[in-house]
Each structure stands twice: as structure tokens, then as C-alpha cells.
Image (tube, rainbow, N blue to C red):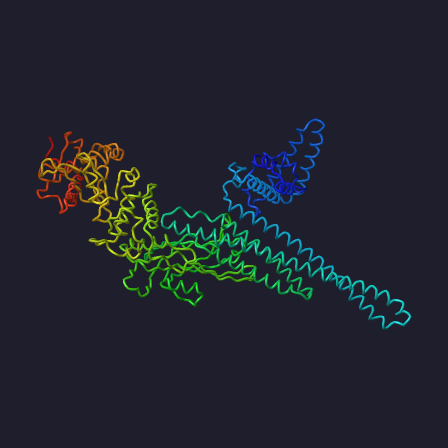
Amino acid sequence: MAVWIQAQQLQGDALHQMQSLYGQHFPIEVRHYLSQWIEGQLWDAIDLENPQEEFKAKRLLDCLIQELQNKAEHQVGEDGFLLKIKLGHYASQLKSTYDRCPLELVRCIKHILYTEQRLVREATNVSTDSPVGGMMDSMSQKYQQINQAFEELRLLTQDTENDLRKLQHNQEYFIIQYQESLRIQAQLSSLATLPPADRQLREPALLSKRATVEAWLTREANTLQKYRLDLAEKHQKTLQLLRKQQTIILDDELIQWKRRQQLAGNGGPPEGGLDILQSWCEKLAETIWQNRQQIRRAEHLRQQLPIPGPIEELLNELNSTITDIISALVTSTFIIEKQPPQVLKTQTKFAATVRLLVGGKLNVHMNPPQVKATIISEQQAKALLKNENTRNDSSGEILNNNCVMEYHQTTGTLSAHFRNMSLKRIKRSDRRGAESVTEEKFTILFESQFSVGGNELVFQVKTLSLPVVVIVHGSQDNNATATVLWDNAFAEPGRVPFLVPDKVLWPQLCDAINIKYKAEVQSNRGLSEENLVFLAQKAFSSSSNNPEGLPEHDDDLVPESLPGRNFTFWQWFDGVMELTKKHLKPHWNDGAILGFVNKQQAQDMLMSKPNGTFLLRFSDSEIGGITIAWVAENPNKAGERMVWNLMPYTTKDFSIRSLADRISDLNHLLFLYPDRPKDEVFSKYYTPPLSKAVDGYVKPQIKQVVPDFRSVPHLHMFVFGSCASSVSDCCFSVSCYRSDSMLDADGDFDLDDTMDVARHVEELLRRPVESQWGGQQS
């Protein structure tokens, strides 16, 4: 009702436009007296193009009539008596008008509500926030403009349909009169066989009648020609609007969807469904086809009754234009709904889905087309887009690469699901210079052919997947992912395959890295400014604290190893993401892991804190490693403090004992940097105490400690277990010592050997207590 209240405040031209919405097809009194009910219905939930929705429309029509009748029955008094009669009349009128076409009532009311809302918004110059029955509120202004354009196209198409029928009727009458003129001419010719007296008696009347008919035919021929030209001009206007609408949907909305799909490959937000886009494309297809049929009927009328003039050329131009428009629509709406994996390993099964957004509307599914998938190189893709002959060219062999498109009645979609493709082999091109195999880009070409309108038009459609990097071994995955990340992040719409900038500013790359990190780790906590500064320093081997001032980042860094390391920046970063995703996600989400801090920075941060303060940072020296750094006394120099670093933990270590339990084990770790008690941060992740032994077995527990720094450094490993019920209730502890130092050359503790001992002890403890510990019963 809110919209109707505001609509009544309109003035001037806006008020006139609002009033013109109403008439016998929908009286303004119905809008006024049922405003609250009308605005409370979900008119937009009904798909006007789906005949199966007619029962919903019929239910709304019945409800509307019932509401009117109820309103009429409650009118009392003299004025109420007249209103009662009026409302009852409107109820009967609406039932008579829409009972056989209830979808038209829905179309009418949707148009009224939309126009009222637009007029109110324009008058107040603000966007409305109040809901109108859940309709339109979620639409952006652009979506509203698209729907408004469709409504305008519908009215134009209906107008030309009416004009075409009028033209056909007039032409049919013209032909009848023309036949009459021929009959008169035949009668005049037959007078020559009559006696002169009879001829003189009948000839004047026939001549007069012929002159009258011929004059009428001349006038009507000019009228028909004008009708044809007017109709052609209206079709030109319709096609201009159609082309503009199609440009908005295909070159703006669909391209934006494809761009979102590409960014989603880097971990960006999902690209969203195709239902709205498909509904728009189907409306385009329907409108285009209707206008094409109208133009063909106009051409048939011209051929049936040729009248000299420019109409033949105009109709040829219109036919050519409408064919171009529908060709562009069909070829552009053959898209990849589900992309194949962009890092593609040979001999590995993969899937993809292609979809034709206008397939259902154009009845392509009546003769289901087959789609073929082929892998081609970057150069072959360039040649393809230049329309150069690439027939039978491919860069590899894909198994199970043919699929028939299927029509899904419930969703109205026509698609082909490739579920079991596999790249059997790949043929690589000659690489340029130091180019790595993980920099070479390929693409999957999907192509098909089908006809519409009973083989009236035949289309060959093709679409290219996002670039894929082919690998043959898992060790290539990191750098291949980096190539894909760069391409997805910095590709521009309409590019030549698969050109991307060689260099970008570091802040631009920061966004891509941050999106990728959050997606891979599956966390809402992204990378901070400090994290990104650290990554910039690592990538550039720079000490600058201002990423904005760093040089452009070069994608050629992808295959190059970091200084002093045998791995690349991307391999290191991928290892960090993998470790965090598998073992550290809760701690990263809690902010317990600083992570992106080098050894010197950790030392500077910790030296200003009390003994026992520690932090967690990702290892610089090992892929997928995290280390604990803490500040404590120097055992070799009284009164002096130093920062200690454990050898990095990896996935292998955390598969034995979690990070939280390891931190719990180390009693000298007291405060998580800067000053949070460790139990406050990690206690919720500690493993509960061991339960008692069951069936004569003791469940072992590995506990790790760091030795007293005031003595010779040792690393102790304790294994605790409870005796079985058949043994005395006592505890045993087994400890393993190393007499040599556990520190590496950098002062880091090496836990690998001791973990091997622990695993050996754990294996011993899996044996029954009776056989393993029988000699130690008390």
C-alpha cells in the first residue's frame, strides 16, 4: 500500500503517466480499494513465459475477484450502494476479460506496479527501501532498466503484429478489388461480341465502374505501400532496441558473469547462477523470433502483391539484421557452466558442463545436438578466433570427449555434462627460451552444430574454456597454479588468447594472493598489511616496508627459485596454505599465528617481552613448515637472554600430535605474543586425558619437551600409558635421550630423529600389556 499512497502524491506529467496505466483492462478503482492486497502478492514469482504457471495466475485472479466481491458486500449507505454495484461490475468485468488468459492479468499488474514504483522513485529522486510484496526490491536499478526495456519490446512487437494483421487484411481486400477490376475488364472485352446497341447500353456503366475501382486501387496501392514502409520503420526501431538490449545482456551481464567465474577460480566469490541470465536470453530469443517471423510474413505479403518502391530493399536489410542478431545471441549463449580444472594432470579424470541458454526456447532439444571437446594450444586458439582454418587441429587426445546435450524439463536448461573425460596425452609446442612447461597454456574447445526453425537456420557454435596448464607430475602443481592465478587475476575481457600483462604493481597482486589464501585456507581471516609486506619482501628479496614503492611484479618470477633455496616463492606460499588448511585453520582464525614473520623480525619482537613469550611463524627454509620461536635465558651466559627456534613442524609432525598439544607439552612456553596466556588461547584444542586401558591394551601418548636451557641441551621424549586392569594400577614412563646436541647450525632443534624413536616406542606399546610388560608387574 506504501507505493499507492506515494503514487497519489504525484503531480504533473508523472500523475498523467500513472493515470494512463488504468482503463477498462484494469480500473483505477480496483487499484485504490485493493491496494494493500495487490501490493502484498508475489506477482514477480510467476514466470509469464511458462504456460505451466497459468494455474498460479488463475488462483490470483480468483482471489482478486473474491476480494472485490467481499469489498462490495461491506459497503453500506447511499454512497456505499453505488460503490457496491460498481465493484461488483468490475469483478464480473475482470473475470470476463482474464478468465481465459490469467497470465495477462499478472503481466498487467506487474507493469502497473513497476511503473508506479519508477514514477515515485523519479519524483522523490531516491531509491525506495520499502518492500512491495517482495517484488523488485532485490533488483538493482540496472535490472529494472532491463525489465523495462523488455516491456517496451513486448509492446513494440505487439504493435507491429497488429499493424501486420491490418496490412494483411487490407491487402486481401485489395486483391479482391483487383480481381473485381479484372472481372470488369473481362466484361468490357466481351462487349465486342455484342450488337452495337447493346454495347452502347452497357459500356458506359462498366467504364465508370472500372474507373472507380482503378482509382480506388491506385489510392489503396499507395496506402498499402505506406503501411509497408511504416511497418518496416517500426521494425527498424524494434531491432535497434533489440540490439541495444542484447548488447547489455551479452556484452555486459554475461561477460561480467564469465569474469566472476574466472575470479572464482582464484577463490573469489561464486559467479552466481545463470537463471536470470537465461531468462533474459530466452526473452531475447522469443522477441527476436517473433520479429523475424513478422518480417518474413511482410516479405511474403510483398511477394504476393509486388508494388514498386524501396520496400524490397528495406525488407532484405531487416531480414539480414535480424539474422545477425539471432546468430550473435545463439553463438554467445553457448557457454561453459562448469569449467574444467585449470591445472590438468594427464591420465586423470575430469569433468565439465556446457550449456546453451536459449536451447529450450528455440526447441533445439527436439533434435539434441552433440558436443565435442578438444584440447588446443594458445596459438591454435588465436588462429581459431581469427577464423583461420584449424580443422582437425588439436594438441592432445581427450578420452570420452563427446556428449549429447540433454534438456531438463524441470529447470528448462539444455546442457551437456562431460563427467569422465581424461587427457590421454599432450603435445607441447617448442618453448621459448627459459619458459617452463608450467607456463604453457592450453584450452578446451567445445563445439557443436544444430538447427532451429526446422533447419531454417543452422548454427555452428564454439566456446573456449579458461586457460589450462597441463602437468604430468604432482611436483609441477605449485607453479602451474601460479600461472593460473596470474591469468585469472589479470586477464581482460575480449583479450587475444591468452595475453596477460607481463608486469603488475605489487598491490594488484596482493588482492589476488589474499583472495587465493582465504579460499584455500577456507577462512574469513585474510592477509594483513604486515603479512603482505612480508610477502612482498620475500618475493622481491627486498627490505622495503612500503609495498606501494616496490617495482612492478613480474610473472617470470613464477619458475625462479628464491635466493638460497631450491624452491620458488609460489611453492613456498602454496605449502603455507596447504599446512594451514589441513592443521592450523582454527589457530589462524583465532589470530594465534603471526605466520608471516622472518627469524630476525621474530627475534626483535620477542626480545622486548618477558621470558616464555613465544610466537608461531612459517618457516623460511622448509616448504609447508611452521616453527615456534620463544625468548628465554642463554644457558651459556648468565644474565643474557636469547631467542630460540624449534625446527619447523610439518604435516608429518601434526599427523602424530597437534600443534595445540605440542604447545601444551612445552612448559617453558608461557605467553603467546604479545602477552596472552597460552592456555587461554590453546586449551580448547588440547586432547582430553587418556582413558583407561581396554582389553589389555595401553593407548600410548607422545609428549614432547625441550630440555632445561641451563644444562646441556637434550631433547626428551616421554611416553605415558596406564597399566591394564590385570596389572597393578601404576604408570610407566619410557624416556629416550640423545647425548649429542639437538640443535642445528642455526640454533634450531631437530625433532626428526626423536620422532622416529617415538614412533618405535608407540609401536611397542600397541602390543598387549601381558606380553610387553609382564615382567614388570608389582
Q: Quadrant of residue 740?
A: top left
Q: Residue furthest right?
A: 197
Query: How many marks can you see?
Result: 0
Query: How far across and how far down the image is residue 697, in percent?
Result: 19, 36
* Residue 109 placement, left or right of 194: left
Q: Nearer the viewer, residue 526 or 481?
A: 526
The relative height of residue 141 versus residue 80 in the rendered view (above or below) is: below
The relative height of residue 741 versus residue 313 in the rendered view (above or below) is: above
Q: Quadrant of residue 212?
A: bottom right
Q: Nearer the viewer, residue 610 or 348?
A: 610
Q: Nearer the viewer, residue 455 or 403?
A: 455
Q: Quadrant of residue 392?
A: bottom left
Query: How far across and how far down the image is residue 635, in percent?
Result: 10, 38
In the rendered view of the protein, which quadrant contains the C terminus? top left
Residue at 55% in and 45% down: 47
* Residue 190 placement, left or right of 103: right
The relative height of residue 92 versus residue 562 in the rendered view (above or below) is: above
Residue 702 visible to an observer of this rendering: no
Query: How far across and how far down the image is residue 306, in percent?
Result: 68, 65
Q: Residue furthest front?
A: 549
In the rendered view of the protein, which quadrant contains the N terminus? top right
Query: How far across and how far down the image is residue 285, in percent?
Result: 55, 54
Residue at 21% in and 53% down: 565
